[in-house]
Amino acid sequence: MVAIDEHIDERSLRERKKSQTRDDLATAALELFVAHGFDAVTVDQIAAAAGVSPRTFFRYFGSKEAVLFADQDEIIDVLVTALASRPAHESPLQALRGGLRDLSDHFVAHREQHLWRAQLVEDGASIGAYQWTVLRPRWEDTLTLEVARRSGLDPVTDLLPRTLAGVAMGALTAASAAWLSSGGSTDVSDLIDRAFDQLEHAVTEARTTT
C-alpha cells in the first residue's frame, strides 16, 4: 500500500510540475509579447524567461501562436460543460446561445488577458491566421457536435449542425469585437444576447419577405 501511495504521489507531483511549467511559459510569453511585440519575441527568449530550454518549450507548445492561446483547452472545456448543462427542452440554437452566454464569465474574469491578446492580434498577421485556421475550427467543431447531439443529426452528412455552429460563431465574433472595442467595459453577456436577438430578427424578416 505504501509503495502504491508513493507512486501516486510521484505521478501527482510530475503532473503538477508539468502544469506549472506550462503556466510559466504562457505567463512569460504574454509578458514578453506585451512588452516587445509579438514578432520581436523568439521562442528562445520565452524559454529563457521561463527558466527552461527551447526544447522544453516545444514539448508544450508547437509555436509562438500556440503559447499565446495557451488557455484554449481550458476555455473549450468550460464551453463543453456550459453546453451540456443547458436544459434538454432548448432548441439547438437556444442551447448554443445559452452556452456562449455562460462562457462570457471567462471574458470578465480574464479581462486584461483578453484585451492584451486582442491588441497583439491587431499587430500580428500570423496571430489572426492562427485564429482562423486552428482556433476557430476547434470552436466550430465543439458547437457542431452539440447541435448534432441535441438534434440527433449526423454532423458529417447533415448540413444543419455545422451551419448553426457557424452562425453562432458569427454572433460570438460580433459580440466579442464590440466588447473589445469598448475596452471590456460593456456587459459581454448582454452583447451576446443582442447579437442572437438580431440574428433571430433577421431570420424572421427573411421568412416574411419570401
Image: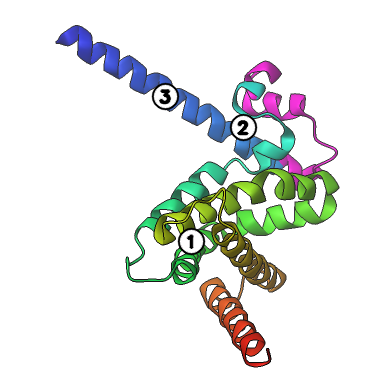
Residue topped by disc 2: 25
Kind of residue sitting beneath label 1: Leu
Q: How many marks?
A: 3
Q: Quadrant of the C terminus?
A: bottom right
Which residues make up the magenta segment? 32-57
Q: Secondary structure at mark 1?
A: helix
Residue 166: x and y, percent? 63, 61
154 to the left or right of 112? left
Residue topped by disc 3: 15
How would you rate the neighbour count of disc 2 (Cα within 10 Å): few for under 14, some for 14-19, many for 20 or more?
A: many
Residue 7: x and y, percent? 28, 12
Residue 162: x and y, percent? 59, 57
Residue 174 vertical position relative to residue 80 in the rendered view, above or below: below
The numbered mark, 1 or 3, whose residue comes first in the sequence reads 3
Residue topped by disc 1: 103
How would you rate the neighbour count of disc 1 (Cα within 10 Å): few for under 14, some for 14-19, many for 20 or more?
A: many
As measured in the structure, the alpha-carbon distance from the residue carrying label 2 to the one carrying label 1 is 25 Å
